[in-house]
Image: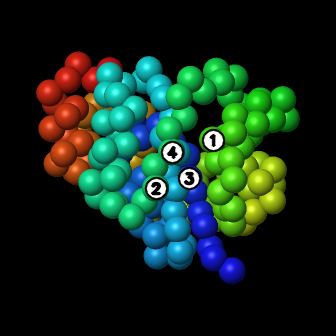
């Protein structure tokens, strides 16, 4: 059986933690999708954030999550709203694994009836978050690829 995985994220910005997750998946999966969510957390377009991923990982298939639901959370109602939205994006792709470093992974895997592959949940291997980077880019430049850093420095990104 072909192993097809996917992950979701805003990648605002793409950083070494995201890269570790994607690289882990690429080693384990036959095919891998990255769903890039629209966000106003950063002044970098959805398409540009997808290009960051595609440049580093040309075999990754990119899916766009435009105008996502605003209701987030781990309560059942919020999970149902997000899962229904995500199922519309994934459509007929026969995914077998969901990759994340987040607690919501168990809900995605449950509702897609697939394997939940948790990667560095507690950020023990790569201790960074996009929130940290957005709060102080100069402090965390070592967690960013050059092309990402150039885009961030050339824009009023927050």
* Mark 1 element type: helix
What label sits on residue 7 in the rendered view?
3
Quadrant housing residue 113 = bottom right
What label sits on residue 49 in the rendered view?
none
Residue bearing the label numbered 1:
89
Residue at left 43%, top 59%? Answer: 60
- Quadrant the N terminus occupies: bottom right
Disc 1 and disc 3: Cα gap in Å?
12 Å
Do tag 4 and tag 1 residues touch (Cβ < 8 Å)?
yes
Residue bearing the label numbered 2:
61
Q: Residue furthest right?
A: 76
Residue bearing the label numbered 4:
63
On screen, residue 15 above or below 69: below
Quadrant housing residue 20 = bottom left
The mark nearer the N terminus, 4 or 3, is 3
The mark nearer the N terminus, 1 or 2, is 2
Q: Residue furthest bottom?
A: 1
Residue at left 19%, top 40%? Answer: 149
On screen, residue 130 above or below 60: above
Do tag 2 and tag 4 residues touch (Cβ < 8 Å)?
yes
Say whether residue 14 is left or right of residue 98. left
Quadrant housing residue 157 = top left
State how the image is colored. rainbow
Disc 2 and disc 3: Cα gap in Å?
11 Å
Residue at left 53%, top 74%? Answer: 30
* Mark 3 element type: strand
């Amino acid at each position: 059986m072909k192993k097809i995985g996917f992950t979701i994220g805003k990648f605002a910005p793409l950083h070494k933690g995201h890269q570790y997750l994607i690289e882990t998946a690429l080693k384990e999966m036959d095919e891998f999708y990255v769903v890039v969510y629209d966000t106003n957390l950063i002044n970098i377009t959805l398409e540009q954030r997808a290009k960051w991923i595609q440049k580093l990982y040309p075999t990754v298939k990119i899916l766009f999550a435009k105008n996502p639901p605003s209701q987030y959370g781990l309560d059942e109602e919020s999970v149902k709203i997000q899962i229904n939205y995500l199922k519309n994006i994934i459509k007929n792709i026969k995914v077998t694994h969901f990759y994340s470093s987040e607690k919501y992974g168990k809900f995605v895997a449950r509702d897609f009836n697939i394997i939940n592959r948790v990667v560095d949940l507690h950020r023990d291997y790569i201790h960074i978050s996009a929130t940290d980077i957005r709060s102080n880019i100069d402090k965390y430049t070592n967690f960013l690829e050059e092309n990402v850093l150039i885009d961030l420095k050339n824009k009023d990104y927050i």
